[in-house]
Image (cartoon, rainbow, N blue to C red):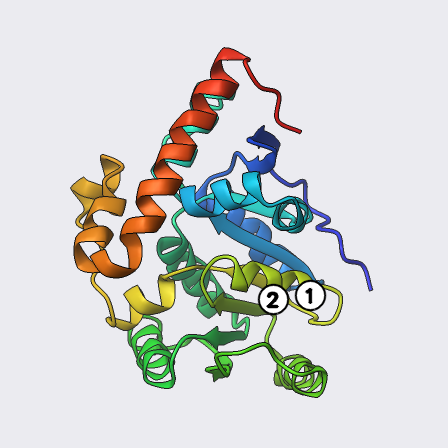
Amino acid sequence: MNTQIQKKTPSKYNIFGVNVSATTYEEAAEIVIETSKKNESVCVSHIPVHGLVLGATDPVFRTILNSFDIIAPDGMPVKIALNMLYKTQLHDRVYGPEFMLRVCQKAALEKIGIYLYGSFPHVIEDLRKNLLGLFPSLVISGYESPPFRELTNEESEDLVERINSSGARIVFIGLGCPKQDIFAFKHKKKISAVQICVGAAFDFISGNKKMAPQWMQKKSLEWLYRLLQEPGRLWRRYFFTNSIFLYYLFLQLTGLKKFK
């Protein structure tokens, strides 16, 4: 099986040792659609500040991310870092929830089956209903909520069989970072489809959680909105990862540290 995207992939740039793709919604979505038609096993992910810092500080996870075909800048700060460090002149990020909707719209038009994997049973059921409400002709070949633990070898093999036999050519994975990226990496040569890690897209599109207002997203304040929604769960993540992000960006901008 050919596991390389045949269409020219977006250029990647080293940010803290993680190779981030300088891409747009339209470019990345077109690559996904065209690749899905070829029955190829490839991986796409969207990296926010949290994932970028985790990749910078964890060499194993960094290796996983750098093996992906596309690592899109999910967070506005990641997009800004690309522009500051490499003058990529990106006008927007490639936000997981928005990207998922755009790919689903294109998949519906071309009758390309999708598979939904992740989150809680009630969330994924609402996600399925909402996607069909938005795109009535969308082919949802399968959907399931996994157990909240690592799959056994037998369970993993059964899952691969279900996905491959479903006819789906695009698999959306909503397990959160880094679980979704690790899952996609482990199954890259087994699942005959484009795997797309979309973070909190399942929660937002299903209506399980509210998305930050557009003005906060554009001002790179989505983290603050989410922190106010879930302070107990997220305050440590944002306090530490945002601080490390700014520190590492300073080091890379000034050349005080070379990231490999």
Q: How many other residues sit within 10 Å of disc 1, few (<14), some (14-19) or many (≥20)?
A: few
> Percent position (x, y) of residue 36?
63, 63
User: Which label was assigned to residue 231?
Assistant: none
Residue to which mark 1 is pinned: 186
Q: Is residue 48 visible?
A: no
Q: Is residue 86 left or right of residue 188?
A: left
> Percent position (x, y) of residue 173?
50, 67
Q: Nearer the viewer, residue 141 or 17?
A: 17
Q: Nearer the viewer, residue 99 or 111?
A: 99
Name which residue lies at 42% across and 59% down. 199
Q: Is residue 221 left or right of residue 75?
A: left
Q: Residue furthest right?
A: 1
Q: How many other residues sit within 10 Å of disc 2, few (<14), some (14-19) or many (≥20)?
A: some
**In the rendered image, which quarter contains the N terminus?**
bottom right
Decide: marks 2, 1 in contact (CB < 8 A)? yes
Image label count: 2
Helix, strand or loop at mark 2: helix
Name which residue lies at 66% across and 60% down. 185
Residue to which mark 2 is pinned: 183
Q: Is residue 114 left or right of residue 92?
A: right
Helix, strand or loop at mark 1: helix
Q: Is 53 above or below relative to 201?
A: above
Q: Nearer the viewer, residue 231 or 20?
A: 231
Name which residue lies at 37% across and 30% down. 91
Distance between the Cα atoms at labels 2 and 1? 5 Å
Name the quadrant containing residue 200: bottom left
> Percent position (x, y) of residue 149?
53, 78
> Percent position (x, y) of residue 100?
42, 60
Type of residue at label 2? Phe
Q: Is residue 144 visible?
A: yes
Q: Is 156 above or below relative to 4?
A: below
